[in-house]
Image (cartoon, grey):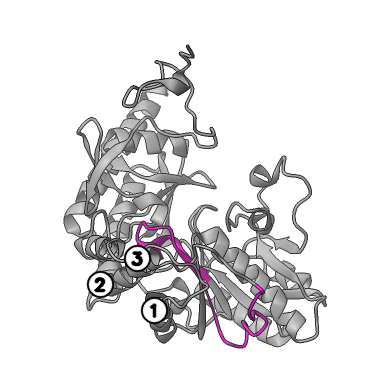
């Protein structure tokens, strides 16, 4: 009789102690798991509560188990899950209309993730020029430190060696320039340039906002050269900056914009928004998705938009951002040997560290505060957008305790 683990009785664990996980080991996971969440708080499987200032990496904009999102999802789940884009999906048409009414865009393509939204944006920019009789214009200018996703095209767009290594020749069509180097940017524009792709706030790259005047300069450059301005608002969008989208602070409008993370509030969802002109080449058969825009995602997306656009919601994000940034600035002044700089926009905040950011993230986790690292030795603070004064105080008190411990350790070592 075969007694291998694959034939273990139902309900009996097949894994022995110290048995390697069956998951592909692509994540350096913390030894922590959660069983429920409410608002800005998570409860681990061992019963400990954590204040969540990671929010699923800028995803859970309405917090955990928001009643309006729960109701929308459960009601839709009881009716219809999936039909494919062979048929009309009314809730998707409704969400697209709401998004276009609120933004620069005329058309929307729904996806399952940020990387897919970026893939759509990249294809759209190339197709626009091909539709205009200029198929040679397919290259996008991108910026050092950028992160646009994990597909072959988006890692090429991001250009970071650690993500490119081992996957063969990078996908052709991306020209990287240093972040903030306007001379290099202008010099990179040539007869094959289709557009400029940029995050209004680099998240993974170290929480580096693009100054409003620079975004305005990019818009002028694109208009001057007849190329497209493509924004990646996957992390900075859907209220996180204190406006619906971060580019609104500059007063400019893009031609194409990729969105994800917060737009689904925790449900896998993304979108590519565009002007009708920029999307002119994307006709029937040029792009598609089996799951993109399915009824479950659309129900949740509409519910998220209800929450984000409610009166006073974005004003609260701005107020809590001000409180948080003021308190963090005080901590930077008190612990200059631990915190070098406070960065960010809205509730996309970053602490540039003098100590290893991985160690500080772990220390904060021990203090009951969840955060996430970023490039340039930065700790990201990405709380749900529903936080209030109490959560800001609790979070900064945890940061203060952790910073004091690092400062004391440094003093003892000296």
Q: Can you identify the residue that label 3 sits on? A: 80
Mark 3, mark 1: which one is toward the viewer? 3
- How far apart are the two marked residues, 3 and 2, measured between alpha carbons? 30 Å
Residue located 19% across and 61% down the image:
67
Q: Is residue 239 visible?
A: no
Point out the residue furthest to the front here. Answer: 1
Helix, strand, or loop for circle 1? Answer: helix
Q: Quadrant where the C terminus lies?
A: top left
Q: Residues within 10 Å of mark 1 (few under 14, many from 20)?
A: few
- How far apart are the two marked residues, 2 and 1, measured between alpha carbons? 27 Å
Dot 3 or dot 1: first in sequence order is 3
Q: Is residue 337 visible?
A: yes
Q: Is residue 388 left or right of residue 369?
A: left
Helix, strand, or loop for circle 2? Answer: helix
Is residue 392 on the magenta stretch?
Answer: no
Q: For the stretch drawn in magenta, what is the main secondary structure?
A: loop
Q: Position of residue 297 (x, y in %)?
A: 39, 64
In the rendered structure, find residue 351 and report the number of the disc placed on it: none
């Amino acid at each position: 009789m075969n007694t291998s683990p694959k034939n273990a009785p139902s309900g009996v664990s097949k894994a022995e102690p110290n048995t390697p996980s069956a998951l592909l080991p692509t994540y350096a996971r913390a030894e922590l798991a959660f069983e429920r969440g409410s608002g800005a708080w998570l409860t681990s499987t061992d019963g400990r509560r954590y204040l969540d200032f990671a929010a699923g990496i800028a995803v859970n904009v309405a917090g955990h188990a928001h009643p309006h999102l729960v109701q929308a999802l459960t009601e839709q789940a009881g009716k219809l899950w999936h039909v494919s884009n062979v048929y009309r999906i009314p809730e998707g048409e409704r969400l697209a209309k709401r998004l276009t009414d609120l933004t620069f865009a005329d058309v929307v393509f729904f996806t399952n993730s940020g990387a897919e939204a970026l893939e759509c944006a990249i294809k759209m920019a190339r197709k626009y020029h091909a539709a205009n009789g200029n198929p040679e214009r397919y290259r996008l200018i991108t910026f050092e430190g950028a992160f646009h996703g994990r597909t072959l095209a988006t890692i090429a767009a991001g250009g970071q060696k650690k993500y490119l290594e081992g996957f063969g020749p990078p996908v052709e069509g991306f020209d990287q320039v240093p972040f903030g180097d306007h001379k290099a940017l202008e010099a990179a524009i040539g007869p094959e340039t289709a557009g400029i792709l940029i995050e209004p706030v680099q998240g993974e790259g170290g929480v580096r906002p693009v100054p409003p005047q620079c975004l305005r300069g990019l818009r002028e450059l694109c208009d001057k050269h007849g190329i497209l301005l493509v924004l990646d608002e996957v992390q900075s969008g859907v209220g996180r900056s204190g406006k619906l989208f971060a580019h609104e602070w500059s007063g400019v409008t893009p031609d194409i914009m990729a969105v994800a993370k917060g737009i689904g509030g925790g449900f896998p969802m993304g979108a590519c928004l565009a002007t009708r002109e920029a999307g002119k080449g994307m006709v029937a058969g040029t792009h598609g998705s089996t799951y993109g825009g399915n009824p479950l995602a659309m129900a949740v997306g509409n519910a998220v938009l209800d929450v984000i656009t409610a009166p006073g919601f974005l004003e609260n994000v701005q107020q809590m951002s001000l409180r948080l940034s003021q308190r963090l600035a005080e901590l930077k002044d008190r612990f200059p040997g631990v915190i070098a700089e406070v960065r960010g926009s809205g509730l996309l905040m970053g602490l540039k560290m003098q100590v290893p950011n991985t160690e500080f993230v772990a220390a904060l986790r021990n203090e009951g505060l969840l955060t996430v690292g970023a490039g340039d030795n930065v700790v990201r603070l990405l709380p749900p957008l529903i936080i209030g004064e109490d959560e800001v105080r609790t979070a900064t008190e945890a940061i203060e305790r952790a910073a004091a411990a690092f400062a004391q350790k440094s003093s003892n070592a000296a």
